Image (tube, rainbow, N blue to C red):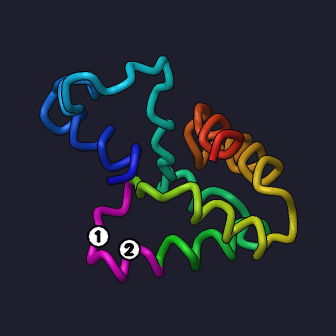
Amino acid sequence: MTVQRLAELADFYGVPVSALLPEGAPQGSSEPPPRLVLDLERLQEVPAEKAGPLDRYAKTIQSQRGDYNGRVLSIRADDLRTLAVIYDVPATTLCDEFIAWGVLNADARRAVEHG
């Protein structure tokens, strides 16, 4: 099980991650990486020449998940790294740009730096 999945389960059950670990497990101070959440409404306000690849990528994920709520979309750090290849920039640079556009939550940079 990944740390991300463990953190999601802990969040779902409303308990600390340590409650899901077996007794005697190491108690590290590391916290789960922040969730990467795209603001799809804000994405529509970004000029298409900038946001086109991100918009197409997000629509593909929505289609695969059958998730068409249209407001937000959770993505993985790997998705952001893939988008960085598409945009031909480092993932941290792209993350900063998405944050500046207002389409990505501000604490997402930590997930990219540690992922």
Residue 64 lies, with reference to residue 98, above or below; the image says below
Residue bounds of the magenta highlight: 60-71
- The amino acid type of the residue labelled 2 equals Gln
The percent position of residue 45, horizontal first and vertical second, equals: 62, 56
- The amino acid type of the residue labelled 1 equals Asp
Relative to 27, 12 lies left or right: left
Q: Quadrant of residue 105?
A: top right
Q: Residue visible at 58% across and 63% down?
A: 78
How packed mark 2 is, by other alpha carbons closer than 10 Å (few <14, some 14-19, many 20 or more), is some
Q: Residue visible at 38% across and 19% down?
A: 27
Q: Quadrant of residue 20?
A: top left
Instruction: Label 2: state its secondary structure.
Output: helix
Q: Are marks 1 and 2 in contact (CB under 8 Å)?
A: yes
Residue at the extreme right of the image, as rendered: 89
Q: Front-most of 19 and 101?
A: 19
Q: Residue visible at 59% across and 32% down?
A: 107
Residue 65 is covered by the magenta coloring: yes
Q: How far apart, in angstroms, are the residues tagged by discs 1 and 2?
A: 5 Å
Q: Front-most of 87 and 76?
A: 76
Relative to 13, 54 lies left or right: right
Residue hosting label 1: 67
Residue hosting label 2: 62
Residue 26 is covered by the magenta coloring: no
